[in-house]
Amino acid sequence: MFQKWFKECEMEGYSSHSVRKSFISRCAERITEAEGSLKDVQLLAGHKSLQSTQKYVKGSLDSQKKVIDLI
């Protein structure tokens, strides 16, 4: 089903896993805008373990500096 949709949208090289990975990564990047946490991303992803969710989360030195500035 996903392959059919991707083909119709001319999205070659995509899979249901790549879309899921992209969704989780974007959620992790933007969750604080919704005043959420990584626990919320974990629940959205359906992961039993936060360690599974963390595989999709990227750190950012710029973000770390912003957090320190807020404190």
Image: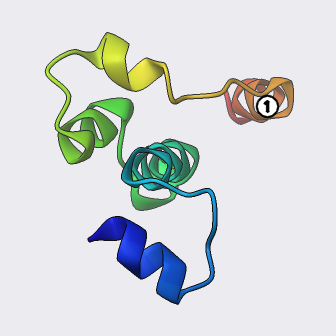
Q: In the shown orientation, is residue 31 left or right of residue 2?
A: right
Residue at horizontal 35%, vertical 11%? 51
Front position in the image: 12 or 43: 12
Q: Residue 48, image x and y in percent?
A: 14, 21
Residue at horizontal 54%, vertical 53%? 30
Q: Quadrant of the N terminus?
A: bottom left
Q: Residue 13, image x and y in percent?
A: 62, 57
Residue at horizontal 84%, vertical 23%? 61
Q: Give the colour scheme shown.
A: rainbow
Q: In the shown orientation, is residue 8 left or right of residue 69?
A: left
Front position in the image: 3 or 50: 3
Q: Quadrant of the C terminus?
A: top right
**36 lies above or below 34:** above
Q: Secondary structure at mark 1?
A: helix
Front position in the image: 10 or 20: 10
Q: Residue 12, image x and y in percent?
A: 63, 67
Q: Residue furthest bottom?
A: 8
Task: Say which residue label 1 marks.
Answer: 69
Q: Quadrant of residue 52?
A: top left
Task: Say how many tags the image has.
Answer: 1
Q: Quadrant of residue 70?
A: top right
**16 lies above or below 24:** below
What's under tag 1, amino acid-wise?
Answer: Asp
**38 lies above or below 45:** above
Q: Residues within 10 Å of mark 1 (few under 14, many from 20)?
A: few
Front position in the image: 68 or 22: 22
Q: Quadrant of residue 43?
A: top left
